[in-house]
Amino acid sequence: MTLDQLTELFKWMTIINIGIFISSSLLSMVLRKITCKMHGKLFGIDEGKVSIVLYGYLGVYRIFVIVFNIVPYLSLLILK
């Protein structure tokens, strides 16, 4: 795999993961009541704690996107 192919791979990985993150964030804000009720019943969590868990999930996902997608992509751009 060439450097150009690897750069393209990380570019598209970053775009897709940022899209998933933004859509997850927007859906969780818009559909907060439905999400809390559904996940509360599904996982047996108090509906008040679901938003805390969701906030933690989005935070961890954001860190993973930065560490595993954005930083390698920027490193590959610097190498080009």
Image: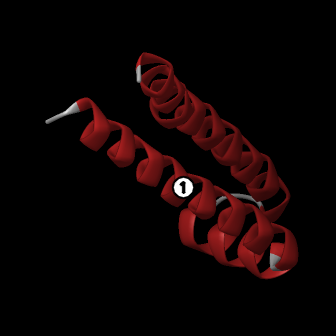
At which x and y percent is residue 42?
Answer: 56, 72
The residue nearer to you, when weighing 38 against 75, is 75
The residue nearer to you, when weighing 4 against 41, is 4
Residue located at (53% from left, 34% from top): 64
Q: Is residue 53 left or right of residue 10?
A: right
Q: Is residue 17 left or right of residue 9?
A: right
Residue tagged 1: 15
Q: Is residue 14 above or below residue 26?
A: above
Residue located at (43% from left, 54% from top): 12
The residue nearer to you, when weighing 40 against 29, is 29
Quadrant housing the C terminus: top left
Label 1 residue SS: helix
At which x and y percent is residue 31?
Answer: 81, 79
Residue located at (71% from left, 53% from top): 54
Q: Is residue 7 left or right of residue 78?
A: left
Question: For the residue marked with disc 1, what is the amino acid?
Answer: Ile
At which x and y percent is residue 18?
Answer: 61, 54
Q: Is residue 2 above or below residue 58?
A: above
Quadrant housing the N terminus: top left
Q: Residue furthest front?
A: 80
At which x and y percent is residue 23?
Answer: 68, 69
Q: Which picture quadrant has residue 56? A: top right
Residue located at (59% from left, 42% from top): 61
Total marks in image: 1
Q: Residue furthest left?
A: 1
Q: Which picture quadrant has residue 44? A: bottom right
Task: Classify 10 Å Cα crowding around label 1: few (below 14), some (14-19), many (20 and above).
Answer: some
Q: Which color scheme is applied?
A: secondary structure
